[in-house]
Image (spheres, rainbow, N blue to C red):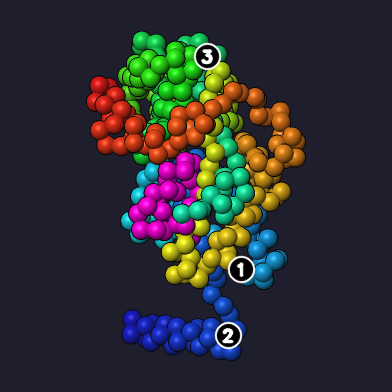
Amino acid sequence: MGLRRLLALSAVAAAYGVAALTAAGAVKAQTSILNVSYDVSRELYKDVNAAFVPHWKSTSGETIVINQSHGGSSRQALSVIGGLEADVVTMNQSPDVDILVERGGLVAKDWRSHFPHGATPYSTFSVFLVRKANPKQIKNWNDLTRSGLQVIVPNPKTSGNGRYTYLAAWGYALKTQGSEAKAREFVTSLFANVPVLDGGGRGASTTFTQRDVGDVLVTFENEAVALQKEFGSDKFEIVYPSISIDASAPLAVVDKVVDKRGTRKQATAYLEFLFSPTGQEIIARHHFRPRDPAVLARYAERFPKVETFTVEAFLGGWPKVQKEHFADGAIYDQIAVKR
């Protein structure tokens, strides 16, 4: 059959298809929403999406497609500012939602009040993943400053995971050594032991587990558990430090996008689903710490108790931390120059 004949048949088929779709409104296009999230949450949201799609079908009669985008949390926020049309964002630190408020009003100023628990459906914190039998005997944050040790952590400028590691170390030093000068010295020593700074938590995990670089990976608890399961407890062990930082994961509807696309109802329901008993169960199964007390109690064995502090209560809040530590030329940049 000639090319012209093929093209003609294709055109007829296309025209027929359009007519069939539009005739009497018999077939409706699927609704889709985009969840822009951080690196180490991709497996969580694959399972959330698989549960939400039939839930939404049964409650609304509508078929929905949930698309995902993952990367370093801060980098993802900048992508949304740059035009990536996220219907919802599910980040790992509140500055990556606040910046969407500040730059263009993409998200409502009072986004924390739109969902329970300050719009955070779960929390986690930083732990250590070490090689089998912990050959370097790494037990706490002070061990990460030892000479000759290699610490793998993502870049605090692009990754919330890396930023929490930096702040966890800073807070540990403040609590144990008592001054900001000592904390700065401590964190400088730790980052001097970082041989490479990956852009996000998943990249750092790959560097440690597959490229075999480093003696310890500092990452979120859920990621450490997932890596141990994937590669085996005969290869890696998890060490819980004496003190860590609460990393509550914030979320928000991106108002400008949902109003443009007409997806506010679906986007809101999707985020509300995370706080439902079903959503909380999925969260717990992925080793994030759920907000629902009943769900947390059922999974208590997998969540060892660790002393934690928050940025808000102990470090003066995110605006202060952002300005003093992570703004251009601030403390982290000064430390990074010395690496």
Give the residue number, with chain letter if any, for mark 1. Answer: 63
Is tag 1's residue or tag 3's residue first in the polypeptide sequence? Answer: 1
Q: Which residues are magenta?
A: 87-108
Q: Amino acid at mark 1?
A: Thr
In this view, the residue in front, 260 or 317, is: 317
* Disc marking residue 139: 3
Report if the CB atoms under discs 1 and 2 are less than 8 Å apart.
Answer: no
Q: Position of residue 28 (x, y in %)?
A: 57, 78
Is tag 1's residue or tag 2's residue first in the polypeptide sequence? Answer: 2
Tag 2 secondary structure: helix
Neighbours of disc 2 within 10 Å: few (<14), some (14-19), many (20+): few
Neighbours of disc 3 within 10 Å: few (<14), some (14-19), many (20+): some
Tag 1 secondary structure: loop
Report if the CB atoms under discs 3 and 2 are less than 8 Å apart.
Answer: no
Q: Position of residue 294 (x, y in %)?
A: 75, 40
Q: Position of residue 220 (x, y in %)?
A: 52, 32
The relative height of residue 198 versus residue 265 in the rendered view (above or below) is above
In this view, the residue in front, 242 or 31, is: 242
Name the residue: 65% across, 25% down. 304
The relative height of residue 78 versus residue 254 in the rendered view (above or below) is above
Q: Amino acid at mark 3?
A: Lys
**Left or right for 301, reference 287:** right
* Disc marking residue 25: 2
In magenta stretch: residue 105: yes
Q: From where the camera sits, is residue 198 visible? A: no
In this view, the residue in front, 34 or 115, is: 115
* Disc marking residue 163: none
In magenta stretch: residue 227: no
Q: Amino acid at mark 2?
A: Gly
Neighbours of disc 1 within 10 Å: few (<14), some (14-19), many (20+): some
Q: How many labels were placed on the picture? A: 3
